[in-house]
């Protein structure tokens, strides 16, 4: 142990003890490699203070400046740092530094700095060479042999800031929404085809499947220029981002307040249930953070009147859905009526 410890007891010098039967090169008498074990509760990275716990799904990349190898995860880094090969190199490097100090080739402060040096450092994650290419409705239509109609009513919504997100589609004729697969299924369905024929003035009973399909084939749009038929809109504000993925979300470093839509989507003629459970952000009401203080008494009264009408609608809806009793709904309405009587 005297070989590895100095009288000044530098804190950065690792004190590695070898059990009986092992030499200083980390090999036992049988020539097998070994691995340094740390005590219970001891963190091999605690001395540097630069490593943090890796969250689930988060990628961390490191580089060992001594062994000159990349380490692709926190677990790989920990395994490498505790490994025999890395430990032997650290010990050899520290011996070299001490000898240089004894020969007066470096100062005391430089020696301490080198002995405390952290050889494994975090680096930025390498960019993935593979880019996800989303599936578009155009491709599915081109590969389809069955007739497709009503593409003038289809709107394709793409995000501006992330080209890897799946396009979302809306059928303004039927009110259906969803990704490419869901919208393609909708276009192949009888409901959309029937609605298309109704829109051009041709009426069929839904049971007249063969007669309806014969007319649909006549109006097939598969071979037409799809870019001219399907309207494409690029807008981050209108795109139904997954939770925490919107560019303005707090998780992405934004303010949490969505911007104004540059290209608001027009409403459909018929309201229908969405094809998927993809959440669509509400556009009827502004975000709470966008409200401003009234500039005068007249504007304040208008805001109060609007709030009163909104609460009346809420009370009626809650009563209809059996969320509140009829008496409770009446109390809600009366409360806002009283509050709106006083002029500003």
Image (tube, grey):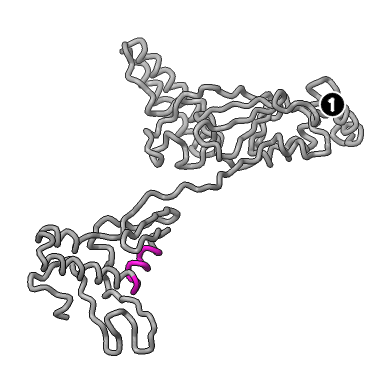
Residue ranking furthest to the left: 7
The C terminus, quarter of image = top left
Secondary structure under tag 1 reads loop
Kindly identify the residue that appears in the image at 75 percent across and 26 percent down. 225
Residue that badge 1 annotates: 219
Number of callouts: 1
The N terminus, quarter of image = bottom left
Q: Position of residue 331 (x, y in %)?
A: 42, 30
Q: Position of residue 64 (x, y in %)?
A: 34, 60
Pick the front one: 71 or 267: 71
Kindly identify the residue that appears in the image at 51 percent across and 38 percent down. 241
Compared to 218, does 108 lie above or below?
below
Q: Position of residue 47 (x, y in %)?
A: 22, 62
Kindly identify the residue that appears in the image at 15 percent across and 69 percent down. 99
Q: Which residues are magenta?
A: 76-85
The reply to whether the magenta stretch includes residue 69 is no
> Residue 121 is drawn in which quadrant?
bottom left
The answer to whether residue 166 is visible is yes
Crowding at dot 1, Cα within 10 Å, few <14 / some 14-19 / many 20+, comes out as: some
Prevailing secondary structure class for the magenta stretch in the rendered image: helix
The reply to whether the magenta stretch includes residue 81 is yes
Pick the front one: 153 or 108: 108
Horizontally, residue 113 falls left or right of residue 213, namely left
Q: Position of residue 4 (x, y in %)?
A: 17, 76
Horizontally, residue 294 falls left or right of residue 128, namely left
Compared to 217, does 30 lie above or below?
below
Kindly identify the residue that appears in the image at 67 percent across and 38 percent down. 180
The answer to whether residue 195 is visible is no
Pick the front one: 51 or 283: 51
């Amino acid at each position: 142990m005297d070989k590895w410890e100095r009288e000044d007891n530098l804190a950065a010098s690792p004190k590695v003890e070898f059990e009986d039967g092992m030499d200083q090169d980390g090999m036992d008498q049988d020539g097998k490699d070994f691995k340094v074990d740390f005590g219970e509760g001891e963190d091999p990275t605690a001395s540097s203070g630069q490593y943090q716990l890796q969250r689930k799904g988060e990628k961390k990349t490191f580089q060992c400046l001594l062994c000159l190898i990349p380490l692709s995860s926190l677990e790989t880094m920990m395994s490498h740092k505790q490994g025999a090969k890395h430990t032997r190199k650290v010990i050899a490097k520290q011996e070299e530094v001490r000898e240089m100090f004894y020969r007066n080739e470096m100062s005391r402060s430089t020696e301490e700095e080198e002995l405390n040096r952290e050889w494994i450092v975090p680096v930025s994650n390498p960019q993935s060479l593979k880019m996800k290419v989303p599936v578009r409705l155009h491709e599915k239509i081109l590969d389809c042999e069955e007739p497709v109609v009503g593409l003038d009513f289809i709107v394709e919504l793409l995000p501006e800031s992330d080209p890897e997100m799946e396009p979302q589609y809306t059928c303004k004729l039927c009110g259906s929404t969803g990704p490419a697969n869901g919208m393609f299924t909708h276009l192949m369905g009888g409901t959309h085809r029937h609605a298309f024929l109704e829109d051009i003035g041709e009426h069929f009973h839904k049971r007249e499947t063969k007669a309806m399909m014969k007319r649909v084939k006549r109006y097939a749009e598969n071979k037409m220029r799809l870019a001219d038929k399907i309207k494409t809109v690029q807008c981050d504000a209108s795109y139904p981002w997954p939770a925490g993925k919107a560019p303005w979300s707090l998780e992405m470093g934004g303010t949490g307040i969505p911007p104004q839509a540059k290209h608001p989507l027009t409403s459909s003629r018929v309201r229908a249930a969405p094809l998927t459970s993809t959440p669509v952000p509400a556009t009827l009401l502004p975000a709470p953070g966008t409200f401003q203080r009234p500039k005068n008494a007249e504007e304040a009264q208008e805001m109060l009147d609007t709030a009163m009408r909104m609460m009346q609608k809420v009370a009626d809806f809650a009563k209809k859905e059996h969320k509140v009793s009829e008496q409770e709904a009446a109390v809600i309405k009366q409360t806002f009526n009283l509050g709106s009587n006083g002029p500003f």
